[in-house]
Amino acid sequence: MTKNINKNVHNTGLSGIRLVSNFIKKPVNEVIQLTVGEIDLPTPFATKQAGIKAIEQDHTKYTDNMGILALRRIITEYAQEFYSEPYNPVTEVLVTVAASEGIDLSIRALVNPGDEVILVSPGYTAYKQAVTLAGGVPVVVDTRSSNFRLLPNQLEEGADVKIIDRFFRHRELPDSESFSKPGFQLKTA
């Protein structure tokens, strides 16, 4: 049966999150899980009530596959107000169930088979698996020795990079300005 599975699935290995979860021997209810983005608090009452109300009003069907338009409009207003970034809520905003899904979809949309993708370490553990599943080649650059800052010389030492700055490049990210400093050139596909 496994011979029919995409070879990239076999090459991914377990994510750091899965390794930690497998390592823990205590019952789940005795451990505070910080690996999956969930807080160790009960669901707020207002959230529970909103869910009940939605069910009572028959809001139980799939939404538009880009997300509820009213929510996409709010997202574009937020992006404009706080980042001065104009987006079209009809054609340029996609709402996903969680961040992991959005990251995975973005990587699959940007990475071609054979592309080398720099991943900053330490970082989100599932990037490596997502790049591998997309057929890319993860190139991990350890930033611990540079106080967790990605520096131009670290990229030059990393690999013959085909892709780098198409993903997660935003002026609000720490040190994103270093990508445009004079003398810092990146090879891109």
Image (spheres, helix red, strand yellow):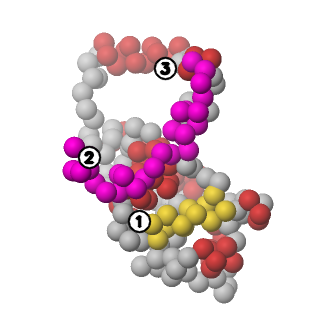
Left or right, 62 with reference to 53: left
Rendering quarter of residue 172: bottom right
User: For the residue marked with disc 2, what is the amino acid?
Assistant: Thr
Q: Position of residue 117 (x, y in %)?
A: 49, 67
Quick one: 177 or 135, which is closer to the camera?
A: 135
**Which secondary structure is most common in the magenta stretch?**
helix
The amino acid marked with disc number 3 is: Thr
The magenta region covers: 1-27
- Asked if residue 93 is positioned above or below residue 64 in the image, the reply reads below
Is residue 86 visible from the viewing direction of this image? yes
Mark 2 secondary-structure assignment = helix
Q: For residue 136, which numbered disc appears in the image? A: 1
Q: Give whichever of 2, 165 is nearer the camera.
A: 2
Q: Residue at x 76, y 65 (%)?
A: 146
- Residue contact at pointers 2 and 1, CB within 8 angstroms: no
Which residue matches tag 2? Answer: 2
**Is residue 3 highlighted in magenta?**
yes
CA–CA distance between discs 2 and 1? 21 Å
Residue 139 is one of the magenta-drawn residues: no
Indicate the amino acid at tag 1. Gly
Q: What element does badge 3 sit on?
A: helix
What residue is pinned by disc 3? 47
